[in-house]
Amino acid sequence: MNFDDYIFHMPLKVRDYELDAEGIVNNANYLHYMEYTRHEFCEQAGVSFKAMLDEGIVPVVRKIEIEYLSSLRSTDVAESCIRYERKGAKFIFYQDIFRGDELIARGIVTIVSIENGRLSRGERLAEYFKDYER
Amino acid sequence: MNFDDYIFHMPLKVRDYELDAEGIVNNANYLHYMEYTRHEFCEQAGVSFKAMLDEGIVPVVRKIEIEYLSSLRSTDVAESCIRYERKGAKFIFYQDIFRGDELIARGIVTIVSIENGRLSRGERLAEYFKDYER
Amino acid sequence: MNFDDYIFHMPLKVRDYELDAEGIVNNANYLHYMEYTRHEFCEQAGVSFKAMLDEGIVPVVRKIEIEYLSSLRSTDVAESCIRYERKGAKFIFYQDIFRGDELIARGIVTIVSIENGRLSRGERLAEYFKDYER
Amino acid sequence: MNFDDYIFHMPLKVRDYELDAEGIVNNANYLHYMEYTRHEFCEQAGVSFKAMLDEGIVPVVRKIEIEYLSSLRSTDVAESCIRYERKGAKFIFYQDIFRGDELIARGIVTIVSIENGRLSRGERLAEYFKDYER
């Protein structure tokens, strides 16, 4: 599998406490995986989530659409991948999670940016990501 | 606020370990709230989730769309509400989370049913919910 | 079972997302149960955890000893019980979790209090709990 | 820092969803870290936790003692370290979590082994770990 089409990707090993009684990763944990991947991407882009908060930039999740095509299980190592697009005040992250060549889950996460205490057009947040826009 | 339009609703008090560093309930925990509410609804409908699994009926989340309109915070007591609709093999749960009159989050959760080891039309799962269909 | 010997107790229903692949509540979730119970106790004592933080009182967990005597499972409703003792700067919570008459887990949680930005003797925190000391 | 004195150690990066409203990793998540580290150790020892369950060997946590000496925060990378000792039917894991040279948390986790459906002396579980005993 070639992940070069994404702006960022990272391996994520399933941890057994993330499984539920069916022996599969619980649906909510995919949002954890996706949040963690976004924050790691931010660090690669030069700014940690914490540094953003310290700067008065508060990214807020407005909407998530996620499809579960298959399930992750114990000992699986997934690859968590991101694409990014800005649409006006919205920052849209396309987040795909693979196991080998198999697409396991596909999320679309819409973020808006509270800047200086109010909903913004996202100018300051966009600055961090400008090299990654497609 | 009148919740009679829903087939099931229950209070959910925020627990402080569900907050993140921004002091708001982390986005993934809303999926926990919604799953818990569905399972409580199932019990009211006469069957626990565990009993379903024991019967060879495995409801699987296929898709979730969730909008975050506001945030839950420490000490908040939310009301978690469900409507239900069957569309062919899909069981669609409309799940709204309120704080008082304010809609905080709105989810649409699509479930399919693995029955006797294979993806089914959901006949057996539908049987449990037939009094709640709209 | 008579829980009058405790200063506070509350029911806690198991949520299925708290189970792991063995079908029992994961060991870490007992610390969540215990923290939530302490915070509910604080509210009964007249102050929420959040209100404490706003006052510059930051209770910090220093030590936890927990014994797991049995396991909680799907649909179980546990009773989470607290006793409290102050030993110098340490606030010690004896936390027992029952299912019916059966003791499931027993924790001893040692808290210290950061007050005005430094480790304190806990005078201000103790003030809240003074009616509950044994 | 030299971790050679441990039988197994691995890095663990803090994920922001593990923080609570105080901006530090919530106390329960340390048990997650420690469980994950034990399971990774098991894989290094040649058997995954899942494989154990499939073999009818069910390790069960009986007791945990954990001291919190400091706190992990956003962007921290901890080193999670294990020593192991067998005392009769008890498997005792000494689990230390460092940030650089600083010991952050110290746990002692006591495990017993359910083998073939009943509490055992742990002969089969011990077999897996025999090269790591000190």
Image (cartoon, coloured by chain):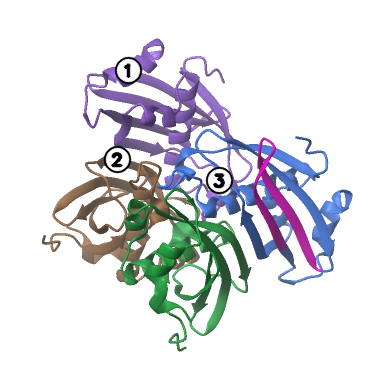
Chain colours: A brown, B purple, C blue, D green
Q: Is residue B86 left or right of residue C120?
A: left
Q: How many marks?
A: 3
- The structure residue drawn at horizontal position 37% and vertical position 53%, both measured from the top left corner, is D53
Horizontally, is A20 left or right of D71 in the view? Answer: left
Could you tell me which secondary element the residue under label 2 belongs to?
A: strand
Residue A129 magenta: no
User: Do the residues at discs 3 and 1 belong to one chain?
Assistant: no
Q: Quadrant of the N terminus of chain B?
A: top right
Which secondary structure type mostly characterizes the magenta part of the structure?
Answer: strand
* Measured Cα–Cα span from mark 2 to mark 1: 25 Å
Q: Chain of mark 1?
A: B
Q: CA distance from mark 3 to mark 1?
A: 32 Å
Between residue B109 and residue B24, name the one nearer to us: B109
Residue sitting nearer the eye, D89 or B53: D89
> For the magenta stretch, what is the residue range?
C89-110
Residue B119 sits above or below residue C124 on the image: above
**Callouts 3 and 2 in the same chain:** no
Q: Which residue is mark 1?
A: B126
